[in-house]
Amino acid sequence: MKNKILVTGGAGYIGTHTCIALHEAGYDIVIYDNLSNSSCAAIKRVSTLIGQPLEFIEGDIRDAETLRQAFVDHQFFGVIHFSGLKAVGESVTKPLLYYNNNVSGTITLLEVMRQYNVKNLIFSSSATVYGDPKFLPIDESSSRSCTNPYGQSKLIVEYILEDLALSDDSWNLIALRYFNPVGAHPSGQIGEDPNDIPNNLMPYISQVAVGKLEKLSIFGNDYPTVDGTGVRDFIHVTDLAQGHVAALNYLQQQVDLQRSNSKRSSSKSSSVGFLPINLGTGKGTSVLELVSAFSSISGQAIPYQFTSRRVGDIASCYASSDKAKNVLGWEAKLSITEMCQDTWRWQSINPTGYD
């Protein structure tokens, strides 16, 4: 019998790609999403790609009653928790919305999980929890502090998970700290489709390339970097999806080991507790370098203008991924070129997204 996984936010950008990877790895999936920044069309396309329908529950992560019904109807092994608002700029102007959704929603989910004794969770965290890093590459022992409410909401949830693990050692909690997901499924059928004006760099570049937007605004060209623009660790979304499969496989191995040890001994076997792991490539790419690479791949000019720095942004951020490799056996495989190729395929096939 395949393990069944609840994927909150499973209709979103990272969620849809992860659902495909989970299916390919033999997991049974139930998607839970309120469709605030996602589309039923994305779920239908995932179903087509995997060759079978996906079960979908429309619900808000803060809706305890709908969540409880999902746990009554299904016997879940664990939860992959993507649900959350994710735009740095928007979080600065709407902090209460971000704390309500990202923090309160996670607390509601954890309370329902505890009620139904489902204590295996993979949390969608972020490299923003490191704030303005004191050294590069950033490893998991780096100090945590945030420069914007979005990152702060992720960090608060991490603190909650840490305290939960300390209070109850039966929890297995992995926080995957993403760097900058980009790219799309190689089929070109699913990809990043933000509502309104994109908040993230790659979809903005691709929408300029396809003619949907006039030009790119680059926030700051006076950072202490290779060309004055911000440097980030861009990771292909399909690599990121495989990171979730690796984390889930690791949880399964640990749970099996705990059960085996408890049968052989009267003493209780230790759990995973709270385990933070970076998912990145370990390489930094500047905004202008990404623009150049995308223009070369697409054959399209990417007009841009420099504007003032954006509140909450930092100069450089890229990962040490040694822990992911050593603990999960995972490492990123796809290059900036492949990230641009797959993004352009998605955007050129779907110039207006899922609409």
Image (cartoon, grey):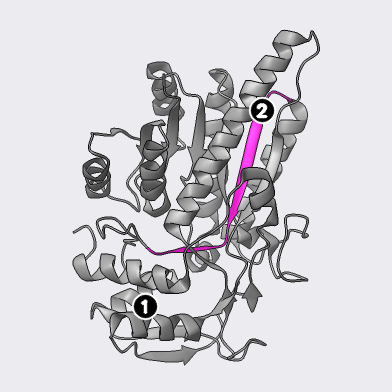
**Residue depicted at 23% across the width and 81% down the height:** 211
Where residue 112 appears, as percent x and y from the top left, is 53, 25
Q: Nearer the viewer, residue 127 or 252?
A: 252
Q: Secondary structure at mark 1?
A: helix
| Left or right: where 226 falls relative to 61 | right
Numbered label attached to residue 205 = 1
Tell me if I can see residue 351 in this picture.
no
Answer above or below: position of 7 versus 17: above
**Residue depicted at 50% across the width and 61% down the height:** 333
Where residue 117 appears, as percent x and y from the top left, is 57, 18
Q: Secondary structure at mark 2?
A: loop
- Residue type marked 1: Ile
- Residue type marked 2: Trp
Answer above or below: position of 285 versus 318: below
**Residue depicted at 69% across the width and 42% down the height:** 275
Residue 176 among magenta residues: yes
Task: Name the quarter where the N terminus is drawn.
Answer: top left
Q: Which residue is mark 2?
A: 171
Instruction: Give the main secondary structure of the magenta stretch.
Output: strand
Residue 285 among magenta residues: no
Where residue 13 appears, as percent x and y from the top left, is 38, 54
Magenta residues, as a range? 169-183
Estimate the spatial distance between the alpha carbons at disc 2 and disc 1, rounded to whole Å.
41 Å
Answer above or below: position of 58 versus 234: above
**Residue depicted at 65% across the width and 28% down the height:** 254
